[in-house]
Amino acid sequence: MKHIHIKNLIFVCSLLICLNSYGQNSNEAPLAENAPTDKPYSFNGTDQLEEYDALIAPYVEKAQKTLKKAKKKYLKGLKDGQAFFLTTRIYDNLGNYEQIFVRVSSWKKENVSGTIANQLNAVRGFSFGQTITFPESDILDWLITNPDGSEEGNFVGKYLDTLR
């Protein structure tokens, strides 16, 4: 009788491992050498942030309309060499803010966790590679990088690149 229970236990544990890894994504692919580089913007004060938000609003809206499909693609599992990032903002205790890329490590229900994927210029108390968690409602944009350097998404980023 004990032998059967051990076999059942091994089966259940194996099943749990399989179920737990389903839909998970390591998301650790390196960026292609020819991938576009981040070009940060700096703003002073609330007025400039309001102007900026108005400027990027149509692109944030486009990103949010396509976010459900991008989330599904991430949860299903990316293709080899792809990496998935979200754009959000972080704020420090002094009221400074910065728009950042986050390399997603977990997306459960409406909460996202990941690591800050760009160097920071304005905020204090955060650093490159730091793990953060934020609600899905704080997402401004999404980005999938491909091994050939091309991108999917990045609506806000592509628009900002045209302003230079």
Image (cartoon, grey):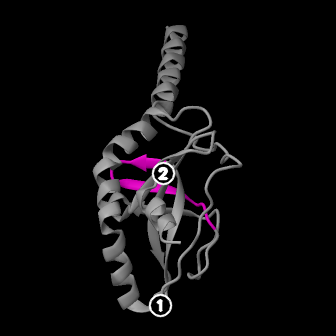
Does the segment drawn in magenta span residue 16? no
Horizontal relation, residue 21 to residue 48: left or right: right
- In the rendered view, tell whether residue 55 sits above or below residue 25: below
- Residue 143, numbered label: 2
Q: Where in the figure is residue 63, as x and y percent of width and height?
A: 35, 55
Lower position in the chain sequence, tag 1 or tag 2: 1
Q: Where in the figure is residue 7, as x and y percent of width and height?
A: 53, 12
- In the rendered view, tell whether residue 101 sits above or below residue 80: below
Does the segment drawn in magenta span residue 114? yes
- Residue 15, numbered label: none
Horizontal relation, residue 36 to residue 111: left or right: right
Q: Where in the figure is residue 1, as x and y percent of width and height?
A: 49, 7
Give the amino acid at mark 1. Answer: Asn
- In the rendered view, tell whether residue 107 sits above or below residue 22: below
Residue on which the image places disc 1: 44
Front one among 39 and 70: 39
- Outermost residue toward the right in this view: 33
Q: Where in the figure is residue 78, as x and y percent of width and height?
A: 51, 35
